[in-house]
Image (tube, coloured by chain):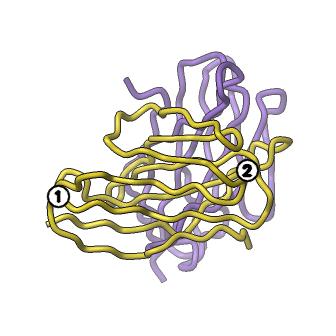
Amino acid sequence: EADIYQTPRYLVIGTGKKITLECSQTMGHDKMYWYQQDPGMELHLIHYSYGVNSTEKGDLSSESTVSRIRTEHFPLTLESARPSHTSQYLCASRRASSYEQYFGPGTRLTVT
Amino acid sequence: QQQVKQSPQSLIVQKGGISIINCAYENTAFDYFPWYQQFPGKGPALLIAIRPDVSEKKEGRFTISFNKSAKQFSLHIMDSQPGDSATYFCAARSCHGYSTLTFGKGTMLLVSP
């Protein structure tokens, strides 16, 4: 079982609030990813990181931002949440020597 | 533009039957093709993966068939069980750029008892 954690698991907030979704992994993986997934739909890559102080935007445009100050930690921040941000957010990581991505359980975000 | 097309969107199979999910791609730079299984409330988990230098890979009841010339690959679940009921995603990794995964839209599989 992969050691990748996401908090909170569920979050309901009002429009305009600032939120940070946490993602941590204890496997020492250099590569980390954030995906957005609407219910029953495909995963869209929104951010990725190839190491400390390295972040890139993914295929899907997102108003969120990320940081990678420590190898094990890859938080995602929404400065001003909107109803269009309602979705599930999945964090993943992998070793540099493997293509296999390990996923966290996800954070289901609802913005009212 | 969707780079990995997955079908069907949903599938109902009787217990003991064979479940077949298909994916097609256009990008010839793809060089790694995993299948992920996702249960409700969980993140996706790697089920099985294949490289384009082989035409088939089998792990237990799960088999990937790969057709490089047709740019298609499929997942076969033999002797399908109710516990296999989940959403399945195919994906592909490009050997160019940052090697990220591109996912198909997913197939919801229901195995009836």
Percent from the top left, x then y, of residue A47?
Answer: 50, 41
In the figure, the yellow chain has which letter? Answer: A
* Quarter where residue A104 is shown: bottom right
Is residue B7 shown to the viewer in this render?
A: no
Q: Quadrant of the N terminus of chain B?
A: top left
Q: Is residue A78 above or below residue A99?
A: below
- Per the rendering, the mark at residue B35 is none
Q: Is residue B42 left or right of residue A92?
A: left
Q: Is residue B21 above or below residue A88?
A: above
The residue labelled by disc 2 is A94
Q: Colour of chain B?
A: purple
Percent from the top left, x then y, of residue A80?
Answer: 23, 53
Mark 1 belongs to which amino acid?
Answer: Gly
Is residue B23 shown to the viewer in this render?
A: yes
Please tell me which residue is depicted at 69% across the width and 54% down the height of the picture. A70
What element does badge 1 sit on?
Answer: loop
* Quarter where residue A46 is shown: top left
The residue labelled by disc 1 is A16
Please tell me which residue is depicted at 48% across the width and 83% down the height of the picture. B113
